[in-house]
Image (tube, coloured by chain):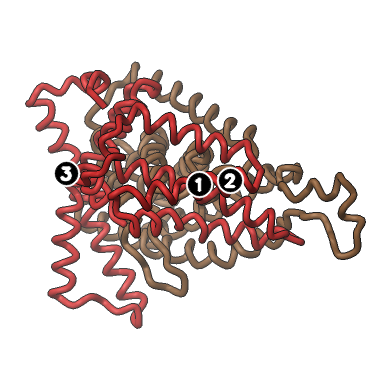
Chain colours: A brown, B red
Amino acid sequence: MSHLHIPDGILPIWLWVLGYVIVGIYFLVVFKHLKQKPNPKKLAVTSVLGALMLLSMSIPIPFVLPYHLNLSTLLGILTGPLYAGLAIFSVNLIISLAGHGGITIVGLNTIILTLEATVAFLLFRFLRRNFKKIFPVAFISTFIALVISTFLTVGTVSAGTQDVKFLPGQHHHKCGACNQPGKAPETFDLKRFIMLILITGGLGWTLESFISGFIISYINRVKPDLLEKNGELT
Amino acid sequence: MKITDIDYYAEYTNSRLNKISAKIKMPAVFLLVATVVVSANIYVLGILYFILLLIIAISSVPKYKIIKLSLYPLIFLALFLFSIRNLSLETALIFIFKALIASTSLVLLIFTTNYIKIFSILSRFLPNFIVNILFLTYRSIFILAKTFESLVDMLKFRGKPSIKHPVLFFQAIGNIVGFFVIKSVQTGENLYDAMKLRGYSDNFDYLKNRRV
């Protein structure tokens, strides 16, 4: 729930084009970074972790609603935000081709999930320096990152529904049909949307944070150097 | 639906749609998505969806699987539609058609066209490092899928943890995915080393000239 699963043709054109433009700027930043510090091996490892993200999405977690893991926070913690964004873009593109979310929304989803990965990376680094127990550190980093990205999702939908003319039913309002008894204009109820997102998302945040806590605890036991490199995997 | 299964259908289904070049199918899908984005005419959208269903019906593609996967966006569309006050049937149908046309056309594309062919065309517009990531991610799915299947088998033999004990259940999932993360990092390093030994020059430029 921390990213947009909205199909194509719903959000206004300016919004999703803006998403792609921001992703384009991000690619430019990465391009410059890779020119200065080329690390093709890390690109390969990030790609495999992207594939892991895709596979984890196919593990259904039966808990009231059918959830699946997202793992972008884990990707952020392990690879750092710069590389995580690349894998997040490719995962979003691949799943959108499989009908999971719109292809026009890939840019916006990449931004939201990359910011989620960035928040998790920074929080994890900060908390790890100050606290000893790894599980709560991983849990809190993931949870806060998921909450922030969910509110980014809500903000994006809110920005896209400010001008309600995009709703086709709105023409009733202009042509005066809404003056007829029983015909009220269609409006997007942001409060109701937030309620629905919080009900479904709240469970998802808790589940993902719990599992991420266990995943990072396991990595810390078996191969702690992966967590000690601050995103420098290779 | 697993991506490995979709890849199988794209590669081995013997339908006419599979034989059409990706250079034709991709612009067609692009046009459909563009129509979905700009049109709010219920009749245009309804007819387009009907045509897509007709194409699926007369082609020898896995019909049930394609339609089932294409319905997935409706779950999330429902959240959006529930948030509209005084929602009319017309508006609901327009949004449903928009979601279904885009998802059905994309799902039909990937069920009849190998991802590699799609990436080959996209590689003409995307920067090199993104193309690298796309190809490597896709390749890794198949490598990791084998490990994943072995892990699932192992879980079955040892007895799956039950959701009735949520902490144990989530811990087991955490341990499995944690193992998988470590395995993935090692796989990534080995994959890169192996490709380097076989002459990989940190790009997939040769795929741009591949027949699609």
Quarter of the image containing the N terminus of chain B? bottom left
Residue B10 shows in this picture = yes
Residue B189 lies, in percent from the top left, at: 17, 37
**Mark closer to the chain start, 3 or 1:** 1
Mark 3–mark 1 contact, CB under 8 Å? Answer: no
The front one of B170 and A125 is: B170
Which residue lies under the disc numbered 3?
B186
- Mark 2 burial class by Cα count in 10 Å: few <14, some 14-19, many 20+: many
Q: CA distance from mark 2 to mark 1?
A: 8 Å
Give the secondary structure at mark 3: helix
Residue A147 in the image: state x and y as whole percent. 55, 55
| Secondary element type, mark 1 | helix
Q: Residue furthest front?
A: B58
Query: Label 1 is placed on what type of residue?
Result: Ile
Q: Amino acid at mark 3?
A: Gln
Chain under callout 3: B
Question: Viewed as shown, does residue B111 lie left or right of A169?
Answer: left
Give the structural element (helix, strand or loop) at label 2: helix
Residue wearing tag 2? B45
Res A76 quadrant in image: top left
Give, as a three-letter code, the residue at label 2: Leu
Spatial CA distance of label 3 from label 2 is 48 Å
Q: Residues within 10 Å of mark 3 (few under 14, many from 20)?
A: some
Residue A126 vs B69, above or below: the answer is above
Q: Is residue A47 visible?
A: no
Chain letter for mark 1: B
Q: Label 2: chain?
A: B
Q: Residue at x 47, y 46 (%)?
A: B51
**Residue carrying label 1:** B101
Q: Nearer the viewer, mark 2 or mark 1?
A: 2
